[in-house]
Amino acid sequence: MAPTAAADLRGASAAHADPAELGKFDALAPRFWDPDGEFRPLHLLNPVRASFIAERASLSGARVLDVGCGGGLLCEALARAGAQVTGIDLAPGMIEVARLHAASQALKIEYRVQDAHALCAASAETFDIVTCMELLEHVPQPAATTAALARLTRPGGALFISTINRNLKSFVLAILAAEYLLRLIPRGTHEYERLIRPAELARWARAAGLAVRDIAGIDFSPFTHSARLTRDPAVNYLAHFERLS
């Protein structure tokens, strides 16, 4: 993408994306697929997320959109399950890494440097499944982004969102422990004020014409290097919504 085009895109999406947040992840893009690097927690969480989706929606032949796809970790898992996957992200470095890695795996995935709000103009109600993992806590207007995700989902389709709860436990584990004590992820990755309680997400979803179908917690252990679903959404959690007609 030419510099002027990239600047235009970022300007058009300024209300829905934080340039500082984009910069953080763009700088780390070359190390995205290193399973022992800064994105190691995502590599460990990805099978749990993919299984959660596969158990609640049919992936074979489904039109899937992953919003905030990063380097393509979830996109590749869903493509291997038979879905027709499109991934969008506003970090050009991440999209380039995603394209290169998919090509190396002979996976057919469409990647775009694009904003979900802009995509709504041409692709509203297009996708059977929309996913958005660990993005809402990084955008300036999460309620508006939730509404855009809903518009991209066809009536009867499924929307899956992963984010982090906002409470004392999540502050201690997801920020203090993960970023400062254990250094599992770079310092400054998350800001406590931007974390999202499940009740807040459910309220935004209902306002956007979505019905809550399931909410599950994700228990991540840095000591056993494992992740599993739980019924407690106190820290990391996954939510499944259905777009109503």
Image (tube, rainbow, N blue to C red):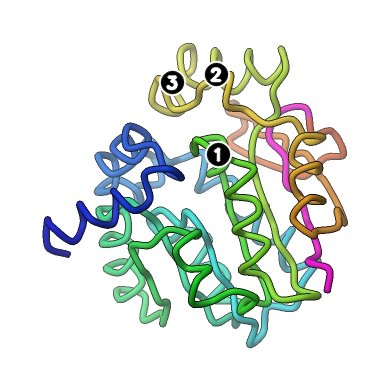
- Residue 14, image x and y in percent? 36, 44
Residue 111, image quadrant: bottom left
Residue visible at 86% across and 52% down in the picture: 214
How many C-alpha atoms fall within 10 Å of the one at disc 1: few (<14), some, or many (≥20)?
some
Magenta residues, start to end:
234-245
* Residue in the foreground of this view, choosing between 139 and 213: 139
Mark 3 Cα within 10 Å, few/some/many (few <14, many 20+)? few
Q: Is residue 59 magenta?
A: no
- Answer whether labels 2 and 3 touch (C-beta < 8 Å): no
Q: Nearer the viewer, residue 71 or 104?
A: 71
Task: Give the residue type at disc 3.
Answer: Arg
First along the sequence among labels 2 and 3:
2
164 vs 116, left or right, is right
Q: Nearer the viewer, residue 13 or 55?
A: 13
Counting from the top left corner in percent of width and height, residue 73 is at 47, 58
Which label sits on residue 141? 1
Q: CA distance from mark 2 to mark 3?
A: 10 Å
Residue to which mark 3 is pinned: 183
Q: Secondary structure at mark 3?
A: loop
Which is closer to the viewer, label 2 or label 1? 1
Left or right side of 87 for 214: right
Find the distance from the CA under tag 3 to the CA under tag 1.
Answer: 28 Å
Q: Are marks 3 and 1 in contact (CB under 8 Å)?
A: no
> What x and y, as percent, mark residue 101?
32, 66
Determine which residue is flagged by label 2: 175
- Asked if marks 2 and 1 touch (Cβ < 8 Å), the reply is no
